[in-house]
Amino acid sequence: MAELKTKPTKASVTDFLQTIDESRRADCKALVRMMSEATGARPRMWGPSIIGFGDHEYKNAAGKASPWFIAGFSPRKRDLTLYLMTGIARYPSHLKKLGDHSTGKSCLYIKRLADVDVAVLKDLIATAVKDLRTPRHIE
């Protein structure tokens, strides 16, 4: 299995945010606040374009562990891509109330915060972080 290419860097989150189109920068700053609050962690750059929060050990299907973040986002060209490591599908009640979005396995795609219910998004992020930190019970 190949090593993950995306890793934390020493690049400045503030400097990165200054490169974002002004119309999207406010949304990015709001996401930084939401994810910092939910994780209790400071933002840091992962690769050239992902802002991650906290530390998590990600295990792939083969069981290989790699360092990763608890939650993060990237202002991609088309969408704001939010990464929640618990997976998105496990939150159908949040998604139903969220507003205009699409999803991947662990990704939530939104065009801009104005398209979604921000209170629901905050709760979704906080719930996913809490779920990731809660030890799984073996039955």
Image (cartoon, rainbow, N blue to C red):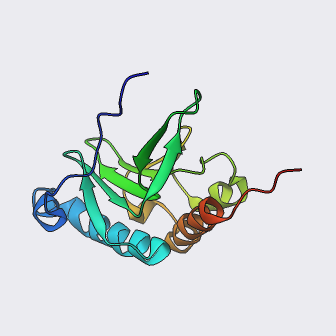
Nearest the eye: 94 or 61: 61
Q: Provide residue 129's location: percent of width, then percent of height.
A: 56, 64
Q: Residue furthest top?
A: 1
Residue in the picture at 49% in, 50% down:
57
Nearest the eye: 60 or 104: 60
Relative to residue 128, is residue 4 drawn left or right?
A: left
Residue in the picture at 56% in, 38% down:
105
Q: Provide residue 82's location: percent of width, then percent of height.
A: 43, 52
Relative to residue 120, is residue 35 drawn left or right?
A: left
Relative to residue 37, is residue 96 drawn left or right?
A: right
Residue in the picture at 60% in, 47% down:
87
Q: Residue furthest front?
A: 64
Q: Provide residue 109's location: percent of width, then percent of height.
A: 45, 47
Task: Please identify the quarter of the rendering in which residue 130 is found.
Answer: bottom right
Q: Provide residue 139's location: percent of width, then percent of height.
A: 89, 50
Q: Is residue 128 above or below residue 40?
A: above
Q: Is residue 72 above or below residue 129?
A: above
Task: Please identify the quarter of the rendering in which residue 136 is found.
Answer: bottom right
Residue in the picture at 55% in, 58% down:
99
